Amino acid sequence: MGILAKLAMRGMAPFTGPVSLTVNVCYAGGTGPHDRRPDLDNIIKSVKDGLNGVAYHDDSQVWRVTATKVWGEKDETTVEVRSARGTGEGGHGE
């Protein structure tokens, strides 16, 4: 995750302040919600840890997580990190 995040950041500095995280995981071979292992909370933890020092300084900055785990046509994971600054959300200092 860290290597891919570094490539996606294209040399940009990590976010400071609160961020939101969206994680979508798709497993090949079916349709609808994926109700087997790995657990979604374990996937989220791995993603958050992998982005430490790359997309943000520390995963304590993550104030909102939206995540899905579904069956689909191909194995694919997408991750989006957004700054909460200037959105009117995300805590103090807005």
Image: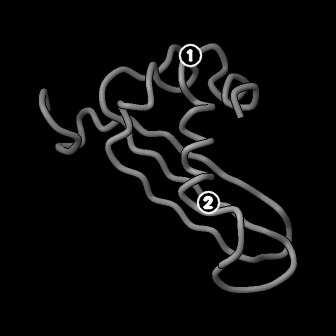
Separation (CA) of disc 1 from disc 2: 23 Å
Give the residue pinned by disc 2.
24
Identify the residue shown where x is 70% and y is 62%.
38
Left or right: where does residue 16 sit relative to residue 12? left
Residue 75 position (above or below residue 88)? below
Closest to the observer: 36 or 31?
A: 36
Residue type at tag 1:
Met
Q: Position of residue 94 (x, y in %)?
A: 14, 32
Please state the total of marks drawn on the protein image.
Answer: 2
Secondary structure at numbered mark 2: strand
Left or right: where does residue 92 sit relative to residue 47? left
Residue 39 position (above or below residue 58)? below
Residue 22 position (above or below residue 34)? above
Q: Residues within 10 Å of mark 1 (few under 14, many from 20)?
A: few
Residue 53 position (above or below residue 18)? above
Secondary structure at numbered mark 1: loop
Q: Residues within 10 Å of mark 2 (few under 14, many from 20)?
A: some
Identify the residue shown where x is 62% and y is 42%.
46
Identify the residue shown where x is 45% and y is 58%.
66
Q: Position of residue 4 (x, y in %)?
A: 74, 31
Foreground disc of the pair 1, 2:
2
Quarter location, residue 83? top left
- Upstream in the sequence, badge 1 or badge 2? 1
Residue type at tag 2:
Asn
Give the residue pinned by disc 1.
12
Closest to the observer: 53 or 12?
A: 53
Q: Position of residue 51 (x, y in %)?
A: 58, 30
Identify the residue shown where x is 58% and y is 61%.
40
In which quadrant will I find the N terminus?
A: top right
Residue 78: mark: none
Left or right: where does residue 76 sit relative to residue 5? right
